[in-house]
Amino acid sequence: MAEPASSPISDATDPDVRREIIETVRRFVAREVIPVASEMEHADRFPAEIVEQMRELGLFGVTIPATYGGLGLDLLTYVGVIEELAYGWMSLTGIINTHTMAATLIMAHGTKEQRERWLPGLASGQPRGALSLSEPDAGSDTRNISCRATRDGDEYVITGTKAWVTNGERAGLVALAARTDEGVSAFIVEKEPGPQFEGIAVSKNVGKLGYRGIETVEMAYSDHRIPAANLIGESGRGLPQILGVLEIGRINIAARAVGVARAAFDAALSYAEQRKTFGKPIGEHQAIQLKLADMATRLQAARLLTRDAAERKAAGLRCDVEAGMAKLFASETALEVATESMRIHGGLGYTTELPVERFYRDAPLMVIGEGTNEIQRLVIARGLMARRRNP
């Protein structure tokens, strides 16, 4: 039986500590990420040196309790860190997101032995973690999961294919959703980083419009055996466990959307002050001013929705609606602000000389990732009706 931690993520961090952590990440991004992000993104090159520096900063253990070697910080701090990383290069946030969700699943639903065995390593970023839920025929329809885990004595035998696994090739630990006789269950799969490992094959690395420099893979399991002790929580209870963790994923998506929107807005504002037409900066033209005003207002609203969802989740309150709202609004904001930034830049915004085109290519991922925005609208509406019936 699982023995969950009383509070998988701290609900309070000293504001001064939070500001110091976020400012440290902001300086790191300005110094190490922004100067090389465009070049590495266009080359679709994994940022190994940057990721190692992120590990040294403790970013893989931001929300893992200090008891297990993490920083033990709250979700508001995590949201601030993700926003800063996304401001420099959105792909970096995906490496942290899937790792954090895997760690949170173990924190919230793992046994004492599972937490003691795996959380210290995850806190240090060695191994790196991944969360594997989606399949080629089971994306938003999570109840259609067909990857199978069959009990065989003291082991489970896993067979099936998982899709859209961020960090899958380089991860050493995968939190996996698979179907058992009792229903969908969650498991811990250990592997060595690489394309092959004892019944696990990275069968496809998906090319993408944006979100480049980080692998998004299919993983094929062929009679892969894991100890029965690697079951997280109760058999058949994996889906609600993972859906609860996905709230953190949606808050992460919202935070990274705020980061991308902020970067696109700052670029537009700077260009509007520098570029002149008809004898004055374009920022003095009313048409551009209206765009900037709308962009800034939506950006601030997205940030506040994201922080509200993070506060509720950290406090242990139900936040399916709030996380859905934050993800929905922030991702649509990122897409709109990136588009408007490109329009303000004119023809230059369409070139690869400036990062505006990268913001424009990265933004659609947030509309789709961690549940499409159409699904978010259903989650929000159903959650609101459920709360009305059961206040």
Image: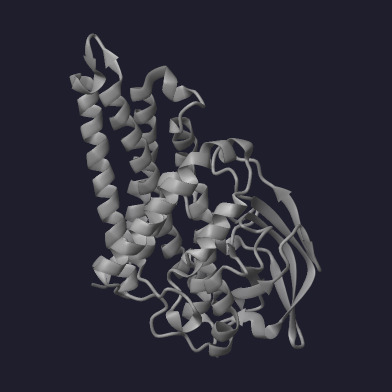
**x then y, percent, for residue 310:** 33, 64
Of all residues, the one furthest to the front in this rendering is 31
Q: Is residue 171 visible?
A: yes
Instruction: Say whether residue 168 is left or right of residue 61.
Output: right
Q: Nearer the viewer, residue 121 or 141?
A: 121
Would you place residue 384 above or below residue 84 in this image?
A: below
**x then y, percent, for residue 333:** 34, 41
Q: How is the image coloured?
A: one colour
Residue in view at x 54 percent, y 65 percent: 99
Residue 127's quadrant in the figure? Answer: bottom right
**x then y, percent, for residue 388:** 24, 66
Q: Nearer the viewer, residue 209 or 87?
A: 87
Quadrant position of the C terminus in the picture? bottom left
Would you place residue 317 above or below residue 57 in this image?
A: below
**x then y, percent, for residue 372:** 46, 49
Instruction: Say whether residue 296 is left or right of residue 352.
Output: left
Q: Nearer the viewer, residue 237 or 26?
A: 26
Quadrant position of the N terminus in the picture? bottom right
Instruction: Say whether residue 288 is left or right of residue 29.
Output: left
Q: Is residue 382 visible?
A: no
Residue in view at x 42 percent, y 64 percent: 248
Residue in view at x 27 percent, y 15 percent: 276
Q: What number of labels is visible?
A: 0
